[in-house]
Amino acid sequence: IKMREKGYLRVAVILVMAIAVTTIVFSAKNTTAAEFIVDDDGPAHYTSIQEAIDAASDGDTIIVKPGVYTESITINKSINLIGDLGAIIRCPATPEDAHIAESVNYREDPPEPYYYEYVIGVFGGTYSSGNDTWWGAGTINVNISGFEIDGNNNGTGTSHRFAGIIWRNAIGSVEECHIHDMYGPSGDGSGEETFGIIVYGDSDITIRNCTIEDFSRGGIGVNGDAGTLPDPVAYVEGNRVYGNGLEDATGWWAENGIQFGYGATGSIVNNEVYDCMVNSTSWAATGIMAVDTDGVWIDDNYVEGCDVGISAVDFPGSLYGSPWDYYHLSNVSITNNTLYGNAWQIDICNDARDITVMYNTISNTGGDCIDVYSYKIWYPSYDIPAPTNVEIHYNNLMDATYDGLWVGPYVTDVVDATYNYWGHTSGPYNETRNPDGQGVSVVGNATFTPWLDSPYPDNDYGYSSETGVIGYYEEDVPAGTMTTVEAFDCSISLNSSVYNTVTIIEYEGNPEGEITSGLMGIGKWYDIQIDNESAVQWPINITIYYTQADLDSAGVTENDLQGISYWDGVIGDWVLFNDTGVNTNNVDGYEGFLWANVWHLTPIAPLSEDNTPPETTKIVGEPKYTRPDGTTLISGDTPITLIATDNGGVNHTYYMIKWYNHTAGEWEVITDGWVEYTGPFTIGQYHSKSCLHNISYYSVDYAGNVETVKWQWEYVDQTPPEVTVIVGDPKYPENVAFPTYVTTSTAIRLYGDDYLNPSPCNTGSWRIYWKINNGSWQNGSVGETINISFNETCEHTLYYYAEDDLGNKGEVQNITFYVDDSPPETGIEFGEPIYEKPYSELVLYENFTTG
């Protein structure tokens, strides 16, 4: 990260890693969920939370009454843990600890798993007591809410990590918790690495409405193993995370407020992060970070007072070695965030691919608003890739001590930074491409034209439009003389009684609303601004010149030209000035010009008669799937969007859908004839049939020009795949579809198929999902047959369904099996009469029973 005097720092990340092991364990279900009460001063079921957890079964709920519970608790089963207001879990002097397979300290030689001390440990998988490690497959379902979690600064030292909550291989949530005092013996950000909440493994977790403070390393960390093991998915929403601020001491850890990394995916939405800073010349603390992973959405957060506000960073394997060479960073969206008072607001570096930065507001910037670069600036001899496919649009970059956008020297892929507001209507300052720009500067390999003339969203003149500026020109005019200012094929002649400034702004397209009068623009759009309008002698003259190429591009002739119009924000339309006209005489290489004598200023545009129909484009959204044979299919839920454009404005767009009935051999209209388009539609809105559909569409403009009808075919699959269950031997009863009794050696196979008639209409690609009792859902690979057996006797219910690559999901079905490995017992019973002879010889009469 660049810092102070254009110095540079690297963001500090939380290290993780792992060893691949996969195990599937099916357990019997808990048929009756219980509720336990914990109260430290009674009366209750238990006075200790851990006692209640130990006594609970899967599916049970534990409610903790107000009080201080000084204990370190371990959860290794599916439960709900709910704290009433005032329930405090306080870390004891010697907290519980454990290794987990996914987190390895690569600072050690050889690398060793991290040891985690914890206030609350949530662990799915297998526990090995010999090395105190949680590892392997298997998940539990856990929900925790309502607690104050007091770490009591009881981390024991630098050989351990210390967490308020450590979460591995669990599905569920942590909500409404306040985690604090999570330091080690130092009582500050030095010493051991400490965390509020840290998540690993095959987890799917929601962390919502928590407050986290007093940690040295991470507020909320969600990390994969940077390897082949399952990685967590997390939804971090509505939390507040407070860093340590800038300390006077050195040697503290660089804390990160929220971090997703090393394969972890999910969303970071509507959180507040404050004061993540570190006194270091080598590292920077970060408010929100995505590192070495794919698929993170960072949206609608507020980040203030951090070294780096939001960071999208790939840690280069060429520099740091394995395992940092396993992932590159990709598909990170940074949207709708407010960043205030951070030294470096948004940071994108190294092999970061497909990064989108949109709709953010950035202000009070200590350094740069946005940086895009490679660590190669520090390590030129290393092969460190630079970011690619970076899109930066519709952001408000209000101020910067250094640059609004700084693109480093090794970035060869052009950064697309069009349609941003750079703090001034004139756009960003750039030494060669926009030297008159008065906004924050753009440095390096980026394109920034067009830009926005005002902060996003634009609502000037009563209408919202985000058309970009492609030209900006200012000129000072003297007092008391008629002066003409010219730029971009436009001139303004005026007389001002005082020294004044005239600005001409050129837009790439219509900067306001549609033209509903039946006229059309010819591709020239301007805004004229005068600093002191009261000093001007009105009317002033505006002239707009045109070439034959301008007319040809608009599809009009000189006879079609009408004059110059202005935007009327009151009625929301473009209106011709009263005193306007056209001069078709050639002037200085122009074919002619339009003129107007005007008494007021708003955006202006030359208009002509509209003789050109609209142009409509159909866009098919997701899901869609392309089969190996090249056929593309959509589902009944795939949105279909129609976009119509017209120089004079589109009045109506219509569509009609037909379905080919293969049985009848004819087309059937499934809409009510032609339907007016009001927004994206789906095939599923109209019927549930699959296969070939015809979508026809056209538009009409305000001048009454009608577009020729267009049509396209779409193959539609709305039919979910099916699952067939085959039960092997031994089983009972025989010769039925679903026998009731099986053994632990009985093989149960789940077969899938996805076939429609005619065949071009099926996706043909499916996965089978299944679970046993209350276990977590598991799935096979595409087209895989699933083989299941039970490893314990008792009742088991198998749930299953299949889903294709379009998201067509079958109904969940279930079969209950009774698993019996016990042979029958045989006894003998003698009836009466019976006589015992000597030497234990028995005589049996005809009335006897055996069994």
Image (tube, helix red, strand yellow):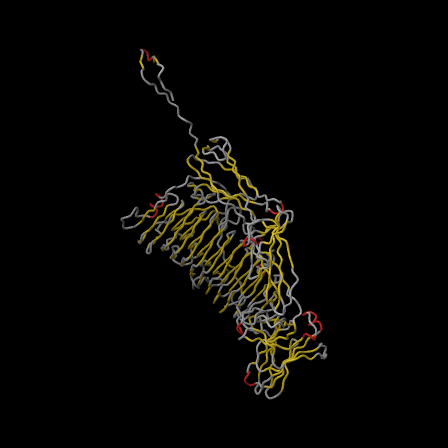
Find the residue positioned furthest to the top.
Answer: 838
Residue sitting nearer the eye, 44 or 694: 694
Q: In this view of the protein, can residue 621 be seen by the observer?
A: yes
| Residue 209 location, quadrant | bottom left
- Whether residue 320 is visible, yes or no, is no
> Relative to 759, does residue 520 appear above or below in the rendering?
below
Q: Nearer the viewer, residue 558 or 102?
A: 558
Residue pushed farthest bottom? 480
**Number of numbered discs on residues:** 0
Which residue is pictured at 67% across the width and 75% down the height? 561
> Measured along the vertical axis of the image, is residue 72 above or below residue 29?
below
> Which of the pair 724/318 is nearer the observer?
724
Residue 129 coordinates in the image, percent (x, y): 41, 41
Q: Is residue 286 left or right of residue 847?
A: right
Above or below residue 268? Residue 604 is: below
Q: Position of residue 721 (x, y in %)?
A: 55, 44
The x, y position of residue 841, in whole percent, is 34, 12
Could you say where residue 389 lies in the image, as x and y percent from the top left?
60, 59
| Quarter of the image with the C terminus in it | top left
- In this view of the protein, which residue sits in the foreground, 350 or 573? 573
